[in-house]
Amino acid sequence: MHDYDAIVIGTGGVGSAAVMQLAVRGARVLGLDRFAGGHDRGSSHGQTRVIRRAYFEHSDYVPLVQRAFELWDELERASEQRLFQQTGLLQVGPAHGLVLPGVLRSARQHQLDVESFTADEVGRRFPGFVAAPDCAAVLETGAGFLYVERCVLAHLAEARRHGAELRSDVTVRSWRTSGDDVVVETDQGAFAAGRLVIAAGAWAGELLADLGVPLRVLRKPLHWFANDDPRYGLAQGCPVFLYECPGGVFYGFPDLDDGRGLKAADHHGGAVVDDPLAVSREVDTAEHDNVARFLAQHLPGVSHRAIGHAVCMYTMSPDEHFIVDRHPGCPQVAFAAGLSGHGFKFTSVLGEALADLALEGATTLPIGFLSVGRFGVS
Ligand SMILES: Cc1cc2nc3c(=O)[nH]c(=O)nc-3n(C[C@H](O)[C@H](O)[C@H](O)COP(=O)(O)OP(=O)(O)OC[C@H]3O[C@@H](n4cnc5c(N)ncnc54)[C@H](O)[C@@H]3O)c2cc1C
């Protein structure tokens, strides 16, 4: 006998959306997390996240991100606050590199609106931005960023409004099936439900160890730089930017004019994290200098003075694509794991997919390419 129709382990990016979707459908749902909503100990913090449609990583993500945009829009209206900011996304890189061909492929396959131009034009179109002469650029006007903590908190608030029970300061130790039910063991006792959703971010490897899919957690710093150059201001039309450079893929956001400066980061690299609870949150000077060098070359008006930093974690799947599925051995368990550093924009739609998998056993959302079966797990 269970008290809940569904339990969601982890109410960060994905779990907050899942718990809301389950509650909206009338399920009696319990969301459990070790930390309070919008916290900075996992993978969903640091002010902003890029959202874009012309997906260079794999064009199969495009229908999912289209649905994610609709859901963000619905959440924005329900929560009566701005969650998405359209700024356009300027992507610069070699014409035959990783990023630009992938962007153009996705745009072609899904008739997305993107504009290509030369390195010379980058500075004319976006004063303050410099592109290497052997590069080209693509602009996706409809892209922008999400206010990451606000999104998580908005999902949780909507979940609560629809009757979800949310408990933070609860550490889940393990879960097991018991007949058709699932029992979740925590430091505050056991909870039983008909269905379980696991959305544990950097801790997914522990809770899904029996799948045998290795998930590698990486330490990823974010750096904020002082800025008084209006060319990089949100209000002045500065876009989100992503550059594929010989030294890695760097990206950043306009100065939001909130006193925090301009945020930039390196998408590649990062130290492997053995224990996500003990990740070092100190500034690493070499990592900071690497991003500062990128800015000096490509956004030379931004100051090198560091005025903030945060440490976040990527959870890498073996092929760097998400794993979203039902547990092969336990059909009452659905999970999302290994978001590989590009998952936040999708969290709204992943919540919908997980609620479908948990309650209906299947989803019409096109997530087949994200199944765990691709790793030979059955
Ligand atoms: C620096 C950085 C930049 C990024 N930039 C982008 C971007 O621009 N665009 C984009 O789309 N994506 C981006 N990402 C990726 C994106 O942010 C993540 O994929 C996404 O936020 C992961 O969400 P999650 O729900 O899996 O993890 P989290 O939000 O961390 O949620 C997991 C939750 O589970 C809880 N939990 C885990 N185990 C337990 C347990 N045993 N007991 C209780 N609670 C538990 C944790 O406390 C946590 O709250 C970025 C990530 C980082 C780190």
Image (cartoon, rainbow, N blue to C red):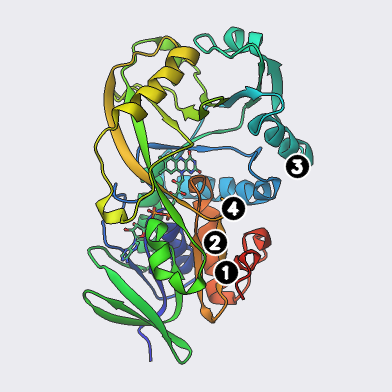
Residue of label 2: 352
Residue of label 4: 319
Q: Which-is-in-front pick, marks 3 and 2?
A: 3
Could you tell me the amino acid type at mark 2?
A: Glu
User: Looking at the image, is mark 3 or mark 1 earlier in the sequence?
Assistant: 3
In this rendered view, identify the residue nearer to me: 326 or 22: 326
**Relative to 169, does residue 339 appear above or below in the rendering?**
above
Residue of label 1: 356
Horizontal and vertical percent position of residue 272: 39, 48
Res 93 visible: yes
- Local packing at callout 4 (Cα closer than 10 Å; few below 14, some 14-19, many 20+) is few
Q: CA gap, disc 1 to disc 4?
A: 25 Å
Residue of label 3: 110
How many marks the image carries: the answer is 4
Q: Is there a contact, CB below 8 Å, between mark 2 and mark 1?
A: yes
User: Looking at the image, is mark 4 or mark 3 earlier in the sequence?
Assistant: 3
